[in-house]
Amino acid sequence: MSGTITNNGTISANGLSGLYNAGAGSGGSLDIAANTLTGSGTLAANGGSNSGTGGGGGGRIAVYYVTNNGFTTSSATATGGTGGIAGANGTVEFINQPVSSWIAPTESVVHGVETLQWFTDNGGSTTVTIAGPQTATIATGTAPFSSATWDTTQIPDGSYQLVLSVLNSSNQVVQQVDKNVVVNNSVSWHSGTLTTSQTWSASQVQALDGDVIVPAGVTLTIDREPSSRHCRVRRSLCRAAAR
């Protein structure tokens, strides 16, 4: 996030207590980024407890900030839960440095027109470039949040590195965040609910980038390759009628 986070309550991701002979749940994770921290509240990612069996392990808390305006770091806990065997403690870190990060894409394989989203609390402007089979600047932005669309059909398929560069007022790079992706527009992508009956041809590799729902009254036919018992669908949808 950008600006100030004021926590006068509790932000938690605690594990649940165990029931009977079931072990307790482990703590989750809190990942916070802000320019300024303030408030008298607490942060918790503690493991759950179970008197009969094992306690859950503590989680992880990571807080990235530029200025701490009175927030007590000792009020953050990621302790292991109690039990017949106590859970191990987790980790708590307060990191005094600016943060820049990718928000989208979240997947490692991209295709078509992709939405790019990124964040920085390091101030200044941002640029996004790609390096791979083709090199180019594909987007620019300003702090803290920016977004852009990237038409991957305009570049060759292959492995690329998305490079987010944060610039200061003198246009010098002060921070850089890389994200590796694979561009693949050579297959036929599918997701969502089918609205009409259709056939997926064996002459084209079929790939899924989300859930595919075949509702009542709709038929999905997946052709198989000649002289083959296999259909060419990635992500394990090859259990429909292969004809």
Image (spheres, rainbow, N blue to C red):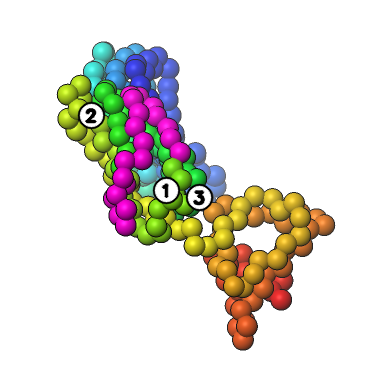
Q: Amino acid at mark 2?
A: Leu
Q: Looking at the image, is mark 2 or mark 3 earlier in the sequence? A: 3
Cα–Cα span, label 2 and label 3: 29 Å
**Is 203 on the left-hand or right-hand side of 111?**
right
Judged by its main secondary structure, the magenta piece is strand
Q: Amino acid at mark 1?
A: Gly
Please give the residue where the numbered disc 1 appears in the rendered image: 54
Question: Quick check: 232 above or below 55?
Answer: below
Q: Position of residue 193 (x, y in %)?
A: 69, 50
Instruction: Examine the image and state in which quarter residue 216 appears.
Output: bottom right
Image quadrant holding the N terminus, namely: top left
Q: Residue at x 34, y 32 (%)?
A: 140
Question: Quick check: 19 above or below 12?
Answer: below
Q: Position of residue 79 (x, y in %)?
A: 34, 36
Q: Nearer the viewer, mark 2 or mark 1?
A: 2
Q: Amino acid at mark 3?
A: Gly
Q: Residues in magenta? A: 130-149
